[in-house]
Image: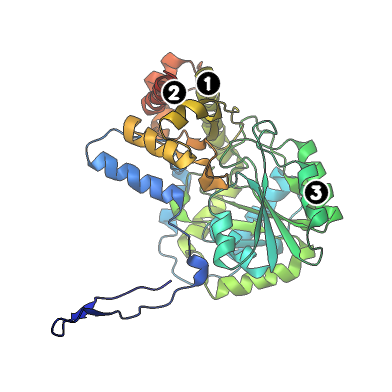
Amino acid sequence: MKYFNKESIIHIGMEEAIITKKKGPQLNRNLSGLTVSPTLAINQKSKELEQAGHKVFRFGFGQSPFPIPDFLVEELKTFAAEKQYLPVEGLLELRKAIAEYYTNFNKLPTSPTQILIGPGSKELIFSIQDALEAELILPSPSWVSYFPQARLIGRETQFIETTFESKWLIKPTDLKSYLSTSDPNKTKLLLLNYPNNPTGIIADPENLRQIAEVCEEYDVIILSDEIYDRLTFDGNFVSISTFAANRTIITGGLSKWAGAGGWRLGFVRIPDSLQELESAVIKINSETFSCVSSPIQYAAVQAFAKTDTMNQEISKYNRILGGLATWVSNELNFAGVRVLTGKGAFYLFLDFEKFRKPLETMGIITGKSLMEYLLENYQVALLPGSAFGMSDSSLTARLAYVNFDGAKAIREISGSENFDSKFVQLKFPDVFGGIQKIKEAVQNIVN
């Protein structure tokens, strides 16, 4: 890609202008076609509309609505003066606490030497992709940053389509069909995420077991992004590492279940069988971010050490998110928008395919144009399915139902409430109002 500086125009008599252009810096060609992350872009667009005086129902940006627990904030205050560089691998005390967490929570025996700390799991996923000379395999849809990261470092990506009927889960038969015809000499990295962003769906153990068997047969490395693991509403989270411990890398962090997105504290568990990869990731991290903020690492230890306290907080989050997931899903399904009820995280994946014909008469033929229509005419901000690897023509969208005051919800909701429309309107007015706007839009599209 080239940039051009100011043009100079020289006129010589009646001759035509001669335009000279000075070349700017040449950028990495892998940046071609990439844009700002869609989640950040929709957040900025929503802010601009609000600054212009519009009421925007912000379902586009997926940030935890809940505050960082008070005991963690106090820990951060205690260690605010810590200024020393920590090891690239991370604070040993924190790595021990996370190893114990995996051993107890996931029933996956883990040693501190298998844990690395990074500035968010996003950065660690990038380091892993950078360290591996591997083709990336992704379900479609999948989180917005997986594919761009692969593209930035020049890796090939293969999307494997999922459907509403398959519950947006990758089919083991589809994975095997692709692997059986692909180059066996290429290292493959399958990246999964459950509970899932953008669908809110969790994979059932049998699905994961069969996928693990296929990966074993074709020697595929698995990267399991489990950033939402503790936001599984029924508490029954199952990791694919249960069935493929020696080939599964796991990433996690504090951004979702601890509400600490801005702390940028992520971690990765790399099995001993992939020790060479771990060494490579450490080298990359040492030459990029060096280490995560020292005060943050010291404070984060208690997120894992105070298990009972943290579990009590998370149970409140799950009651609220689970109630909203069910209410929103029921409302939209009744209006004709197909959506599977979320079982974890705080997302739903909406399918507007039923309305394709009337939308075409309005000149709306892509998911992006549908989202623009909803934002401009109903002030509802959603992300199109194409941002998550779906085709441009796919009339799908991700809805993040986190536009509410999480601290207030925790204070006022005991857990015994019935999440009916009256209750949601009273306690979650922006969620309620936005869903009513979507229903209004659908009704107008049909009529």
Q: Residue at x 71, y 68 (%)?
A: 277
Q: Residue furthest left?
A: 13
User: Is label 1 in a helix, a strand or a loop?
Assistant: loop
Is 363 above or below relative to 142?
A: above
Q: Residue furthest right?
A: 217
Among the 4 quarters of the image, the one containing residue 359: top left
Is 121 above or below relative to 443?
A: below
N-term mark: 3 or 1: 3
* Pointer 3 residue: 177
Left of 262 or right of it: where is 231?
Answer: right
Q: Which mark is residue 336?
A: 1
Instruction: Give how far across and how far down residue 113 sits, in percent.
Output: 70, 64
Q: Residue at x 63, y 64 (%)?
A: 129
* Pointer 2 residue: 442
Q: Quadrant of the C terminus?
A: top left
Q: Is residue 168 visible?
A: yes
The colour style of the image is rainbow
Front-lying residue, 182 or 340: 182
Among the 4 quarters of the image, the one containing residue 429: top left
User: Is label 2 in a helix, a strand or a loop?
Assistant: helix
Q: Mark 2 and mark 3: span between their CA atoms? A: 38 Å
For the residues bearing labels 2 and 1, Cβ distance under 8 angstroms? yes
**Mark 2 residue type:** Val
Front-lying residue, 145 or 16: 16
Front-lying residue, 80 or 34: 34
- Neighbour class for label 3 at 10 Å: few (<14), some, many (≥20)? few
